[in-house]
């Protein structure tokens, strides 16, 4: 496929399930509730979960929970057939009113704006997981985490694996480690089967590390290569792996890296976009010997390789931007090395 025609086409692609996701959810009984559904990945994951359940022949409610500060997202989810509930998850009285569900996807977290709001960051990333585990102590839980918990690792090693020591840099990454520790504690204490997914990074046409680089090149802005290498994973593959991980939940939690198989050079990605756009390239800095990188071979063994390569994503993104396709305007700040967001 040479191009993604429009947002409707994109949303359809982002919610296309894999056979692994169909098998995993098809083996489960009961409803699925997604906490923090209104983020960048949540709507497509919710729609994929609905499509997966239909393909598996399982009748279930897919329920999306968020504050829904953008009402259009709630309307979109309802149009797909997903139930929605408005809830401030940090309010225990509201959290307690949520319906029971045997299957939970936890997508809530706070990253951008964490500096200056450290208290709220820790509440969202640590206290809330504990409350969710209390509320859903009889459920199965798939929880998103981040590769930031590893900290910077030598590029020559090819990325952190799940058994590596954790060295989170900055309060955001530290609070994300706290989130994992809360889930781990309650999984063991209450025998809650879980998976913890360290994502690094999900990408589609409207946001992601590749979009950030492409926009800088196209607009003639310098590209800083100090954080010289990165991972990128097609968002639909990340969502499918998350749903498929229900087949591998356990106590204590199964920990999995979700990332693309390619170790991408920021400089080479920028050069590729410069060639596609016919633009001159301005490079700043020199590549460091370490970067924030994840090795996802374990997930690839379980779920198969991503369906969309980095090269395909770059081709689609370049075409999308050249045609004036919409973007979310939410940069990833992938270049940040000091951990302050």
Image (tube, rainbow, N blue to C red):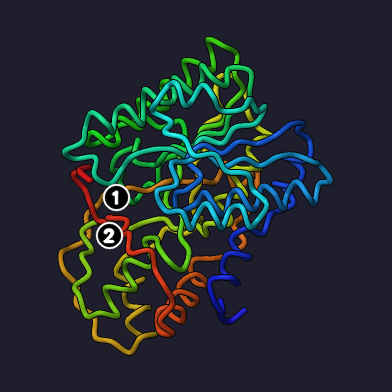
Residue at (46% x, 46% y) in the render: 295
Give above or below for 191 relative to 246. Answer: above
Q: Residue furthest right?
A: 57
Q: Position of residue 36 (x, y in %)?
A: 47, 40
The Cα atoms of the two marked residues, 1 and 2, are separated by: 7 Å
Give above or below for 52 relative to 217. Answer: above
Residue at (42% x, 46% y) in the render: 294
> Which residue is at the front of the view, 155 or 185?
185
Give above or below for 225 relative to 293. Answer: below
Q: Residues within 10 Å of mark 2 (few under 14, many from 20)?
A: many
| Disc nearer the start of the sequence (1/2) | 2
Q: Quadrant of the N terminus?
A: bottom right
Q: What count of labels does the image hold? A: 2
Q: Give SS at disc 1.
A: strand
Q: Position of residue 336 (x, y in %)?
A: 22, 51
Q: Give SS at disc 2.
A: loop
Mark 1 — residue? 291
Residue at (61% x, 52% y) in the render: 78
User: Does residue 97 appear left or right of residue 318 in this picture?
Assistant: right
Q: Position of residue 131 (x, y in %)?
A: 45, 20
Quarter-of-image position of residue 327: bottom left
Q: Which mark is residue 175?
A: none
Residue at (63% x, 38% y) in the render: 245
User: Does residue 147 appear left or right of residue 186 in this picture?
Assistant: left
Q: Position of residue 241 (x, y in %)?
A: 60, 46
Q: Residue furthest top?
A: 189
Mark 2 — residue? 228
Q: Residues within 10 Å of mark 1 (few under 14, many from 20)?
A: many
Q: Are marks 1 and 2 in contact (CB under 8 Å)?
A: yes
> Which residue is at the front of the view, 73 or 316?
73
Q: Residue furthest bottom?
A: 278
């Amino acid at each position: 496929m040479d191009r993604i025609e429009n947002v409707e086409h994109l949303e359809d692609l982002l919610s296309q399930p894999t056979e692994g996701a169909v098998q995993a959810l098809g083996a489960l009984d009961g409803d699925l509730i997604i906490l923090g559904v209104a983020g960048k990945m949540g709507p497509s994951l919710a729609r994929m979960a609905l499509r997966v359940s239909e393909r598996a022949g399982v009748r279930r409610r897919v329920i999306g929970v968020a504050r829904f500060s953008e009402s259009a997202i709630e309307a979109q989810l309802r149009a797909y057939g997903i139930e929605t509930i408005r809830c401030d998850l940090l309010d225990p009285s509201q959290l307690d009113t949520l319906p029971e569900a045997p299957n939970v996807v936890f997508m809530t977290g706070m990253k951008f704006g964490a500096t200056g709001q450290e208290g709220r960051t820790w509440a969202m990333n640590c206290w809330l997981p504990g409350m969710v585990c209390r509320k859903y102590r009889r459920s199965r839980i798939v929880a998103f985490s981040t590769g930031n918990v590893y900290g910077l690792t030598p590029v020559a090693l090819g990325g952190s694996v799940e058994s590596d020591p954790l060295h989170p840099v900055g309060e955001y990454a530290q609070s994300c480690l706290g989130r994992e520790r809360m889930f781990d504690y309650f999984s063991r204490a209450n025998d809650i089967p879980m998976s913890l997914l360290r994502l690094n990074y999900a990408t589609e046409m409207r946001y992601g590390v590749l979009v950030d680089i492409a926009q800088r090149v196209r607009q003639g802005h310098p590209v800083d290569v100090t954080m010289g290498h990165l991972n990128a994973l097609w968002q639909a593959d990340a969502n499918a792996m998350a749903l498929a991980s229900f087949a591998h939940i356990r106590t204590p939690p199964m920990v999995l890296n979700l990332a693309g198989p390619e170790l991408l050079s920021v400089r080479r990605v920028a050069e590729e976009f410069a060639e596609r756009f016919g633009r001159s390239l301005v490079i700043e800095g020199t590549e460091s010997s370490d970067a924030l990188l994840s090795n996802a071979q374990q997930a690839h063994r379980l779920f198969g390789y991503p369906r969309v390569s980095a090269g395909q994503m770059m081709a689609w993104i370049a075409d999308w931007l050249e045609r004036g396709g919409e973007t979310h305007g939410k940069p990833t700040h992938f270049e940040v090395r000091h951990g302050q967001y």
